[in-house]
Image (spheres, rainbow, N blue to C red):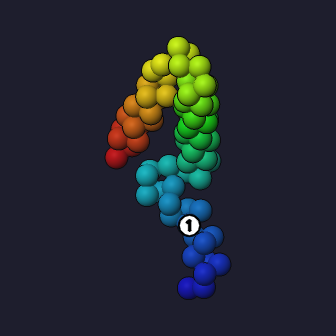
Amino acid sequence: MTQIAQFIRGFHDHPASVDETYFGHMRFAFGFAGLLFAAGLAALIHALIPPLFETTASRLIRKMHARIEARH
């Protein structure tokens, strides 16, 4: 199988490996990316102004971890 064919097959095989469709996997990944962005932004603001967002990043990371664990 060529590298291009393997790459294209990954659009089906990888989402299927976690019992999702391509679009279901895309939705999950976009949601996860949004949470990562929010956690990073909260951590950045907290670094500059410590009284703000004291537990936000860690809470979001725990939420993401729970979502990943629930998938398997």
Question: Residue at point 43% right, 25% down?
Answer: 59
Instruction: Using the rendered image of the protein, determine whether residue 53 is visible from the camera's viewpoint.
Output: no
Question: Residue at point 50% right, 60% down?
Answer: 14
Q: Amino acid at mark 1?
A: Gly
Which of 64 and 71 lies nearest the eye of the viewer? 64
Which of 6 and 41 lies nearest the eye of the viewer? 41
Question: Residue at point 50% right, 49% down?
Answer: 20
Question: Residue at point 44% right, 50% down?
Answer: 19
Q: Dot 1, how many residues are within 10 Å of its Cα: few (below 14), some (14-19), or many (20+)?
A: some
Q: Is residue 18 above or below residue 32?
A: below
Q: Is residue 57 above or below residue 32?
A: above
- The picture places residue 62, in percent across and down from the top left corner, at 40, 31
Q: Is residue 1 above or below residue 53?
A: below
Q: Is residue 38 above or below residue 14?
A: above
Task: Name the quarter where the N terminus is drawn.
Answer: bottom right
Q: How many marks?
A: 1
- The picture places residue 44, in percent across and down from the top left corner, at 60, 31
Residue that mark 1 sits on: 10
Rendering quarter of residue 37 = top right
Instruction: Using the rendered image of the protein, determine whether residue 43 is visible from the camera's viewpoint.
Output: yes
Rendering quarter of residue 48 = top right
Horizontal side of residue 71 vs 2, given as left or right? left
Residue ranking furthest to the top: 51
Horizontal side of residue 70 vs 57, given as left or right? left
- The picture places residue 47, in percent across and down from the top left corner, at 56, 28
Which of 4 and 19 lies nearest the eye of the viewer? 4
Instruction: For mark 1, give the secondary structure.
Output: helix
